[in-house]
Image: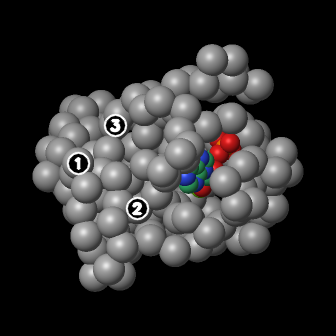
Amino acid sequence: MSANCACGSGHQVLLSAEVIAGRVGELAAAINTCYRDEELTVVALVNGAMIFAADLVRKLTMPVRLDTFALASYHGHASSGRLDFRSRPKLPLSGKHVLLVDDILDTGLTLSGVGDYLEMQEPLSVRICVLLKKEVSCRDIDIEVDWYGFKIPDVFVYGYGLDENEFFRNLPFIAQFEGS
Ligand code: IMP
Ligand code: MG
């Protein structure tokens, strides 16, 4: 499928806005069932997860605190293999249920680095929800997520928060980079 956006260029749509919205609702329902009325601290990894997290938290029914973790591991279309911590959560996490929300699990470097940092804060629990899980034949770092939205092939994607050289985070759908 191909779509034109306000930016005027064509995109190869992998997941439409409607399909994403339906799945975000299902993920929220599963998370609501897991935590019931327990207080939850959602930590969104920005910038990539900001759109997904914004949609997800508005469907959660327990008392939610929201914070962010800003980091970067990607340069252009590939992982740099290095994690830059740009800002850490401001809320105290000790003794709290923490839900890490990210856009995509690729090499696992980001989530394992963040997981290690969070464990040092002594939270009551840490669970992970990602929108996309790339089907990578052998992931360098063994990491399990508790919830994911979609499994996708090992291609470069953008839109709905994910960037293509910092552009296109604003697209309401997820597109596959041509030729990836
Ligand atoms: P990881 O650390 O290799 O698992 O990669 C995680 C981060 O890299 C994600 O949070 C994204 O910000 C970025 N990333 C990985 N794959 C893609 C992609 O296909 N498009 C855009 N960003 C990506
Ligand atoms: Mg990211």
Q: Residues within 10 Å of mark 3 (few under 14, many from 20)?
A: some
**Tag 1 or tag 2, which sits nearer the N-term?**
1
Where is ligand 2, by quadrant? bottom right
Q: Quadrant of the C terminus?
A: top right
Residue at the far top: name it.
137
What is the crowding at mark 2: few (fewer than 14 residues within 10 Å), some, or many (at least 20)?
many
For mark 1, give the secondary structure.
loop
Residue at image coords 82%, 51%? 80
Q: Considering depth in this image, is 147 or 175 the residue closer to the camera?
A: 175
Label 1 to label 3: alpha-carbon separation: 20 Å
Circle on res. 125: none
Any part of residue 115 in sight: no
Tell me what residue is drawn at x 18 percent, y 45 percent: 19
**Callout 3 amino acid:** Gly
Left or right of 31: which side holds 120? Answer: right
Labels 2 & 3 near each other (Cβ < 8 A): no
Check whether the beta carbons of the residues at disc 1 and disc 3 lie within 8 A of each other: no
Quick check: can you spot residue 154?
Answer: yes
Q: Which residue in the protein does label 3 denote?
A: 149
Q: Position of residue 5 (x, y in %)?
A: 27, 74
Q: Which residue is mark 1?
A: 1
On the image, the x and y values in percent for residue 167 come to 52, 74
Mark 3 residue element: strand
- Amino acid residing under circle 1: Met
**Of residues 150 and 28, the one drawn nearer to the viewer in this rendering:** 150
Q: Which residue is mark 2?
A: 159
Q: Nearer the viewer, mark 2 or mark 1?
A: 1
